[in-house]
Image (tube, rainbow, N blue to C red):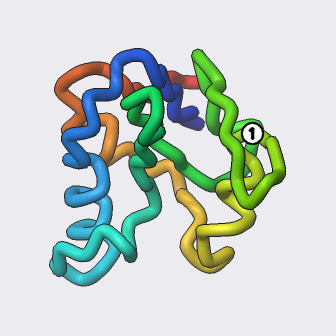
Amino acid sequence: MKRIVINTEKCTGCRTCEVVCSLTHSKGMINPRKSRVRVYRDEVEGIFTPIIPGPKKCIQYSHKPRFVLQDREGDIDILCDLFVDPGQRCNQCGVCTTWCVTGALTAEEV
């Protein structure tokens, strides 16, 4: 079984992962809102963070960022719960890791 590893320090915000994921899982249409990976930008710090909702045991964040949402401080799990349709959880196909040229998204065997 594969696990997607996310290194937030390497993400440049190119959003290629969103495009290829939506192409793969939305019947050949480019629609990042249908993507199972989302890239969030911290407006203050200018930091990009890929967010992939799915089984926590299958995803590892190398540098887990923190966010403040609606006066609530939390971590990645809050973003997953608030912004992702439960029917579109990541299935670990790895297409995003194949196209990530910076190495922010990689796949490893577990």
Q: Amino acid at mark 1?
A: Asp
Query: Residue at coordinates 74% horizontally, 64% vertically from top-left?
Result: 81
Quadrant holding the C terminus:
top right
> Is 42 placed left or right of 25 in the picture?
right
Residue 99 found in image quarter: top left
Query: Residue at coordinates 75% horizontally, 48% vertically from top-left?
Result: 77
The spot of residue 38 in percent (x, y) is 43, 54
Residue 106 found in image quarter: top left
> Is 2 placed left or right of 11 in the picture?
right
Task: Classify 38 as above or below 88.
Answer: above
Query: Residue at coordinates 38% horizontally, 75% vertically from top-left?
Result: 34
Badge 1 local density, few (<14 within 10 Å), some, or many (20+)? Answer: some
Q: Could you tell me which secondary element the residue under label 1 belongs to? A: loop
How many marks the image carries: the answer is 1
Pointer 1 residue: 75
Quadrant holding the N terminus:
top right
The spot of residue 96 in percent (x, y) is 32, 44
* Near-viewer residue (73 or 26): 73
The spot of residue 68 in percent (x, y) is 70, 45
The spot of residue 23 in percent (x, y) is 21, 69
* Near-viewer residue (70 or 27): 70
Query: Residue at coordinates 76% horizontally, 53% vertically from top-left?
Result: 78
* Near-viewer residue (95 or 75): 75
